[in-house]
Image (cartoon, helix red, strand yellow):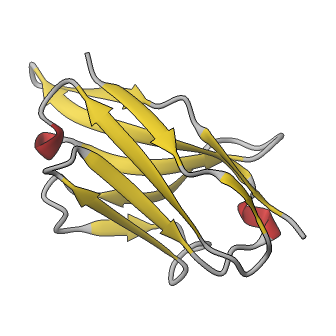
Amino acid sequence: QVQLVESGGGLVQPGGSLTLSCAASGGQFSSFIMSWYRQAPGKERELVAGIRSDGGGTNYADSVKGRFTISRDNAKNTVFLQMSSLKPEDTAVYYCKAVRLAALKYVEYWGQGTQVTVSS
């Protein structure tokens, strides 16, 4: 069973930076497609960024392009989300998701989330 544990959330002022980490255990991390989602109060969960299993391809929500960077370290079974120029509208619970192919079917795993609050 794959387990994901996010860390690095907290309170930061507008314009500040924060780096989230998601450590995975169980399964072959290097084969997982990893992504970060976020959910603000009263809103639906949305995709923030994704990264291919080999780290060779990434994608971002338009709202975070140029400010957030997703990366991974397959040797440490960890995916990161570097966030800069943070805005109050980035306030949300951030979730890590892993997707792996099992028996010709994609299986998803989610972390418990970490709170990011951008406020002065």
* Rendered view: 89 above or below 43: below
Q: Nearer the viewer, residue 37 or 12?
A: 12
Give how far across and how far down residue 39 sits, in percent: 67, 44
Drawn side of residue 105 relative to residue 78, left or right: left
Determine the image quadrant of residue 30.
Answer: top left
Q: Nearer the viewer, residue 58 or 4?
A: 4
* Rendered view: 14 above or below 97: below
* Rendered view: 26 above or below 8: above
Drawn side of residue 57 relative to residue 115, left or right: left
The residue at the far top in this view is: 1
Drawn side of residue 74 relative to residue 94, left or right: left
Determine the image quadrant of residue 77.
Answer: top left
Q: Quadrant of the N terminus?
A: top left
Residue displayed at 12% across by 33% down: 28
Please tell me how many numbered marks the rendered image carries: 0
Residue displayed at 73% across by 81% down: 15
Give how far across and how far down residue 2 sits, in percent: 28, 23
Give how far across and how far down residue 95 sits, in percent: 53, 41
Q: Quadrant of the C terminus?
A: bottom right
Drawn side of residue 32 relative to residue 117, left or right: left
Residue displayed at 81% across by 67% down: 88
Give how far across and how far down residue 41 sits, in percent: 81, 42
Residue displayed at 65% across by 81% down: 85
